[in-house]
Amino acid sequence: MKIISKYKDFYDYLVQDHDADLTYVRQIGLVNKYYDDLFRIKENSIPYYSRYYGYSYGPGWGKHKDGDIYVSSYIFGIYPYVYSQPVINYLYTTVTDMSEWISVIPGADLTQRILSGEDCYADIGKLVQDALKSKYPKYPVRVNPYKNGLPKAMKMYTWKVECEEIFYKIDSPVFVKYYDDLFLYGTYYENTKEFQSPKDTKTIHYVTGISFQKLNHNILKFWYDDLNIINTYNDIENFLWSVKKEPVSNPDNKTKIVSHGFDLKTSFRNIK
């Protein structure tokens, strides 16, 4: 498989195909139809809502205080699986006394420790501290215990499910659900800028053909070992083969005449 793209991605380096007989032109696409129901499964009814609907596990919107956290996720797909990458959101007060949320993405080790029930609030605090240090290097990060059970919430937002159908619906082997913070002022900002206006009435659900390395955040952290194998490259190639179509033949008039047994000079059928 030969990949033609403005930007490289992690799976581009998994295989060196010097004699490629298939070309993947990877370029950004926007999909405004909704297909989440295809990968929604009973035990994932909450993470199905993904990034902007994690509040149901917190103390309630408007009742948060400094140090509160809630869990949400980024959802993305690499054929044939749809993945949910957990995100921890932390509330802090700025120097202008404004309350803001900052989102941090835990790696595989921290996520697994949280899932096992280990007390990891100190480590979450360090993750938040690192994320805040460029703006507020001396901010006193203190993480409040997650009242509704952090391991349970993390489990609800850490999953993958096989769903080949969505990739055929959107006609792409890779996608990410659209989230402003993945694209705002980033590499693909110009491609998605029209959807970031509060006056916008359009809806974009998925962004296809992207390089994950060019998103504003690393949304592959938990799944990196799962994806950084040759199967990822092969799966993408298999999808492209499965949708590869031969061009429809559209012969000119002369070809049509000859194919029906007529002579081009006389327009009479050749009878031998």
Image (cartoon, rainbow, N blue to C red):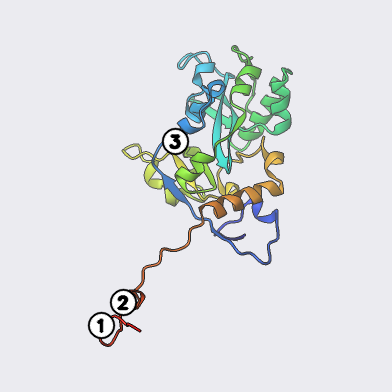
Query: Viewer-proximal residue, 265 or 152?
Result: 265
Q: Which mark is residue 257?
A: 2
Sort mark 2 into few (<14), some (14-19) or many (20+) by Cα contacts within 10 Å. some
Q: Please give left or right for residue 5 compared with residue 143 in the image.
A: left
**Element at label 3:** loop
Q: In whole angstroms, how far apart are the C-alphas of marks 2 and 1?
A: 8 Å
Identify the image quadrant of residue 155: top right
Q: Are marks 2 and 1 in contact (CB under 8 Å)?
A: yes
The amino acid type found where label 2 is placed reads Ile
For disc 3, the marked residue is 35
| Count of numbered badges drawn on the protein | 3
Image coordinates for residue 247, horizontal then vertical, percent: 44, 63
Query: Viewer-proximal residue, 268 or 44?
Result: 268
Image coordinates for residue 68, horizontal then vertical, percent: 57, 18
Among the two numbered marks 2 and 3 on one chain, the one whose residue lies closer to the N terminus:
3
Among the two numbered marks 3 and 1 on one chain, the one whose residue lies closer to the N terminus:
3
Q: In whole angstroms, how far apart are the C-alphas of marks 3 and 1?
A: 54 Å
Q: Which mark is residue 170?
A: none
**Element at label 2:** helix
**Closer to the eye: label 2 or 3:** 2
Q: Are marks 2 and 3 in contact (CB under 8 Å)?
A: no
The amino acid type found where label 3 is placed reads Tyr
248 over 238 or under it: above or below: below
The amino acid type found where label 1 is placed reads Ser
**What residue sits 65% from the left and 47% below the top?**
232
Q: Please give left or right for residue 175 compared with residue 259 in the image.
A: right
Among the two numbered marks 2 and 1 on one chain, the one whose residue lies closer to the N terminus:
2
Is residue 185 in view from this perspective?
no
Image coordinates for residue 105, horizontal then vertical, percent: 62, 33
**What residue sits 51% from the left and 52% below the top?**
243
Q: Give the residue at the far bottom of this rendering.
A: 265
